[in-house]
Image (spheres, rainbow, N blue to C red):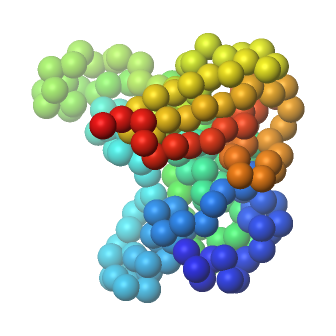
């Protein structure tokens, strides 16, 4: 994480990602740099970067895909594109990202093979989905300018819906949602016990 902060600027990261993220050891690029430097053989053998929900989608449909929210620290928030400058600056392989789509896109159907393993009927449509925080924000019911949403779980997220593109706010995060809306929010680490 320190290497990223020392070798890229806030402006460069905003251009690459379309949002401001705090630099932390748990962020995707920091973990990838650690894997690349500390376990190079595993890094070389890595096929794709996906979230756990993407692995389930792969098992159900045979489709390798993810969404832009789940890859928020690797792809541009609005376009879902892995920025070439960012990849090069971090020294990351560009081939690690699967296709990026929207969380609500149907990406495949359950297969006959998984029917034997799970008992789910063949042919059920499977959507890409997204990470829990964004599912909560999108599904919170906040959809008008000025609506406030509170998503409680392991962390608590309190957000303000804006009809505007993401922009930096000191001490807060701002992500795009849908149809030109964004959410400005803060995350606490003490919601659930």
* Residue at screen point 52% across, 43% down: 188
Q: Is residue 134 visible?
A: yes
Q: Nearer the viewer, residue 179 or 41?
A: 179
Image quarter where the N terminus lies is bottom right
| Residue 114: image location, x then y, percent | 21, 30
> Viewed as shown, does residue 116 lie left or right of 134?
left
| Residue 82: image location, x then y, percent | 66, 59
Image quarter where the C terminus lies is top left
Q: Is residue 123 above or below residue 35?
A: above
Count of numbered badges drawn on the protein:
0
Q: Nearer the viewer, residue 12 or 64?
A: 12
Q: Is residue 162 above or below residue 70?
A: above
> Viewed as shown, does residue 53 lie left or right of 86?
left
> Viewed as shown, does residue 104 lie left or right of 184?
left
* Residue at screen point 35% across, 45% down: 52
Based on the displayed image, in which of its 4 quarters is residue 14 positioned? bottom right
The residue positioned farthest toward the right in the image shown: 164
* Residue at screen point 66% across, 76% down: 5
Q: Nearer the viewer, residue 11 or 184?
A: 184
Q: Nearer the viewer, residue 31 or 6?
A: 6
Q: Is residue 178 above or below residue 184?
A: above
* Residue at screen point 46% across, 63% down: 26
| Residue 81: image location, x then y, percent | 69, 53
Q: Is residue 57 visible?
A: no
| Residue 58: image location, x then y, percent | 35, 41
Q: Is residue 61 above or below residue 69?
A: above
């Amino acid at each position: 994480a320190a290497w990223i902060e020392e070798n890229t600027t806030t402006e460069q990261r905003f251009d690459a990602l379309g949002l401001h993220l705090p630099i932390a050891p748990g962020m995707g690029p920091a973990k990838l740099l650690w894997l690349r430097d500390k376990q190079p053989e595993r890094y070389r053998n890595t096929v794709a970067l996906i979230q756990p929900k993407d692995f389930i989608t792969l098992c159900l449909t045979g489709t390798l895909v993810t969404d832009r929210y789940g890859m928020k620290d690797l792809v541009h928030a609005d376009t879902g594109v892995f920025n070439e400058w960012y990849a090069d600056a971090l020294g990351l392989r560009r081939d690690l990202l699967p296709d990026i789509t929207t969380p609500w896109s149907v990406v495949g159907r359950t297969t006959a093979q998984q029917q034997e393993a799970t008992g789910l009927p063949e042919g059920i449509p499977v959507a890409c989905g997204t990470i829990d925080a964004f599912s909560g924000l999108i599904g919170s019911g906040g959809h008008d300018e000025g609506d406030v949403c509170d998503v409680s779980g392991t962390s608590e997220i309190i957000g303000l819906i804006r009809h505007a593109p993401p922009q930096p706010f000191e001490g807060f995060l701002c992500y795009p949602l849908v149809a030109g809306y964004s959410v400005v929010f803060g995350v606490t680490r003490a919601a659930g016990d």
